[in-house]
Image (cartoon, rainbow, N blue to C red):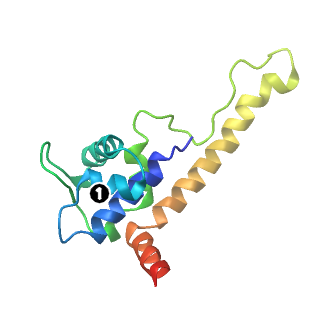
Amino acid sequence: MISSRFSVAVHILTLLELHKSGRITSELIAGSVNTNPVVIRRMMSLLNKAGLIHSSPGVAGATLVRPLHEITLLDVYRAVQVGVQEELFAIHENPNPACIVGKNIQSTLETNFAKAQQAMEQELARVTLHQVANDILHAQS
């Protein structure tokens, strides 16, 4: 299941790009996201570990490691899904094996859900953060 961590990470990376002339703090980012700076610092740690940003402990701000046109939404999705259920869909556990539906529902849904997950990841791979930033800037005009 996709948590809001994904959209927050995209928000952070886009802010870093739009404010790349200076180092912006987690407090400033938190104000834009409307969350606690601790949440932002945790997210930035994941982005740092994934090689999308460079940040140093005790030093305010972060910088993008690669240009936005080289970072896809799939890169961001994978960076923040660490430790979170990997699949988009969860299947209920322990259906009744004595029931024809209960006996077969998991294997049937797994196949279809895997196809949907693959389609979503292919779409995320097509969209760069450069496109997201441009859409935001055009919405501003």
Quadrant in which residue 68 is drawn: bottom left
Helix, strand or loop under label 1:
helix
Left or right of 43: which side holds 74? right
34 lies above or below 45? below
Q: Is residue 77 above or below residue 16?
A: above
Instruction: Inspect the image, locate mark 1, and give the three-letter code of the amino acid beneath it.
Output: Leu
**Residue 76 position in % (x across, y down):** 39, 53
Q: Is residue 135 left or right of residue 1?
A: left
Name the residue carrying label 1: 28
* Residue 110 visible: yes
For image coordinates 24% across by 63% down, the residue present is 66
Residue 75 visible (yes or no): no
**Residue closest to the eye, 100 or 95:** 95
Above or below, 69 against 59 in this view is below
- Give x and y (percent) for residue 3: 52, 43
Image x and y of residue 99, in percent: 87, 19
Name the residue located 37 percent from the left edge and 46 percent from the top edge.
Answer: 79
Q: What crowding class fits label 1: few (fewer than 14 Cα within 10 Å), some (14-19), or many (20 or more)? A: some
Question: In the picture, residue 101 is in which quadrant?
Answer: top right
Residue at the limit of the structure toward the top, as seen here = 98
Which picture quadrant has residue 57?
top left
Q: Residue furthest bottom?
A: 141
On-image quarter of the N terminus: top right
Horizontal and vertical percent position of residue 36: 36, 44
Q: Residue at (20%, 56%) from the top-left corner?
A: 62
- Tag count in the figure? 1
In the displayed structure image, the side of residue 80 where residue 50 appears, left or right: left
Which residue: 40% across, 62% down?
72
